[in-house]
């Protein structure tokens, strides 16, 4: 790690760990999925005919019967079908196999998203879709918590996956103008870091 001309991290926890190992304080920058503007790569995809709620979670999660019933009850009251995009949840109304760009478009076409993943939260944010985020006590908790704080999405977090908690989150309006400004500022900072890092490497004579 000490041989690198530039070190970066996408969350505070990783940055602190890197600094502890190397003595170098890394820059905190966007995850690539947040850095890139996916408005430039819109693709055609067959969206569900009915209005839908995206469920994005790893296959091993959201399998608890209480969580399933809470999500289904919320969707029914909102007249939404449940759609799992990119992962398989047999209890959802639709499971859609898709590539990464189609996946983004499925988020963009949704009425709302419920997710417990880092990238599910990112794509909900960049496509400006109201989201409810559940932070599990799992390996992604540090980076997901850090992301939520940086995007100022604390009030989009579920205390638990229950119908009451889901309703409470979606009752709140999301200030997309402020969210988009935050994302723009983060992207500018990260792009400048990449420019500076590339220039630093270009100015070094490397022997192979």
Image (cartoon, rainbow, N blue to C red):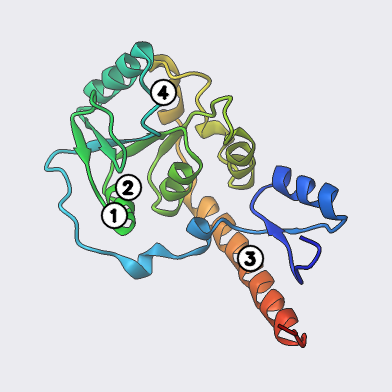
Position of 133 compared to 76: left or right?
Answer: right
- Eye-nearest disc, 4 or 3: 3
Q: Nearer the viewer, residue 159 or 200?
A: 200
Q: Secondary structure at mark 3?
A: helix
Q: Nearer the viewer, residue 75 or 194?
A: 194
The residue that disc 1 covers is 99
Q: Of label 2 and label 1, which has the lower sequence position?
A: 1
Residue farthest along the top direction in this orientation? 66
Looking at the rendered image, the quarter that the C terminus falls into is bottom right
Res 107 label: 2
Is the residue marked by circle 1 packed among few (<14), some (14-19), or many (20+) residues within 10 Å? few
Q: Of label 4 and label 1, which has the lower sequence position?
A: 1
Asked where in the image residue 168 lies, by quadrant, the reply is top left
Res 190 label: 3
- Eye-nearest disc, 1 or 3: 1
Is the residue marked by circle 3 packed among few (<14), some (14-19), or many (20+) residues within 10 Å? many
Residue farthest along the left direction in this orientation? 49
Q: Of label 2 and label 3, which has the lower sequence position?
A: 2
Expressed as whole percent of the image width and height from the top left, the position of residue 133 reads 48, 33
């Amino acid at each position: 790690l000490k041989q690198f001309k530039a070190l970066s991290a996408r969350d505070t926890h990783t940055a602190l760990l890197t600094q502890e190992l190397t003595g170098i304080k890394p820059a905190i920058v966007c995850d690539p999925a947040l850095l890139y503007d996916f408005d430039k790569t819109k693709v055609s995809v067959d969206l569900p005919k009915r209005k839908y709620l995206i469920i994005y979670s790893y296959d091993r999660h959201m399998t608890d019967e209480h969580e399933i019933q809470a999500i289904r009850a919320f969707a029914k009251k909102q007249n939404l079908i449940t759609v799992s995009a990119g992962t398989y949840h047999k209890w959802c109304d639709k499971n859609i196999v898709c590539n990464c760009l189609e996946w983004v478009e499925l988020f963009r076409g949704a009425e709302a998203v419920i997710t417990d993943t880092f990238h599910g939260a990112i794509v909900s944010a960049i496509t400006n879709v109201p989201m409810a985020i559940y932070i599990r006590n799992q390996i992604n908790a540090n980076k997901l918590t850090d992301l939520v704080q940086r995007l100022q999405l604390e009030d989009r977090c579920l205390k638990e996956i229950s119908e009451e908690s889901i309703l409470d989150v979606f009752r709140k309006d999301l200030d997309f103008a402020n969210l988009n400004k935050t994302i723009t500022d983060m992207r500018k900072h990260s792009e400048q870091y990449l420019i500076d890092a590339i220039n630093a490497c270009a100015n070094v004579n490397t022997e192979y």
